[in-house]
Image (tube, helix red, strand yellow):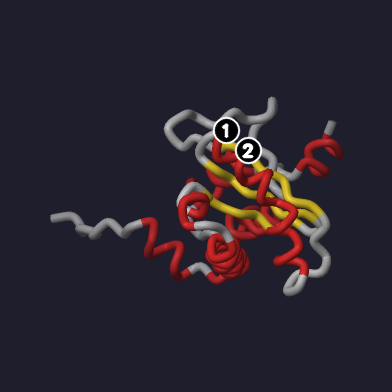
Amino acid sequence: MGISHKPRSIESFLRQDANLDPLRRELARQTRALAHVRALLPAELAAHLLAVRVDPPRLVLFTDASAWAARLRFAAPQLLAALRRPMPSLNAVHVKVHQPDRPARRPEGGPVLSGAAARAIREVGESMTDEALRDALLRCFWPLSRREREERQ
């Protein structure tokens, strides 16, 4: 009789991996920023704000339709004024439409992440003990930063 191993969920691996801590902190930071921005908007408009990305010196807002994007752009000056108090480095608000039902258009050559995110993914991949999983992660997600891609060309 062979040894039976109970399959482990990916979530259990991810929870145990300390290399993911920077990504967890970034997710928490962006979740707090989303809640803060939503609190500054009228309820009807806040309901269509899907995500925010604080990328000093700019704040990027993601909404679900072009009509809501137009309304967010109209509210951007007041929003920027209110957000400059806690985040004085902000000087611009950009609005993008994201429709989750449609596949995202990716830049040619694959997704582009910030250098910090790409390094975090690489560190996680390099630290994995399962060789096949490590190789697959590194093959799929590295190099992802625009600068790294440009340096390799």
Q: Which residue is mark 1?
A: 66
Q: Residues within 10 Å of mark 1 (few under 14, many from 20)?
A: some
State the residue at coordinates (78%, 37%): 149
Q: Which residue is more in the foreground, 144 or 8?
A: 144
Circles 2, 1 touching at the beta carbon (< 8 Å): yes
Q: Which residue is mark 2?
A: 70
State the residue at coordinates (42%, 32%): 101
State the residue at coordinates (79%, 52%): 92
Q: Position of residue 107 (x, y in %)?
A: 68, 29
State the residue at coordinates (51%, 60%): 129
Whether residue 123 can be seen here: yes
Q: What amino acid type is highlighted by mark number 1? A: Ser
Q: Looking at this rendering, what residue extends furthest in the bottom direction?
A: 86
Q: Is residue 107 above or below residue 79?
A: above
Q: Is residue 136 above or below residue 47?
A: above
Q: Quadrant of residue 2?
A: bottom left
Does residue 3 appear left or right of residue 87 in this picture?
left
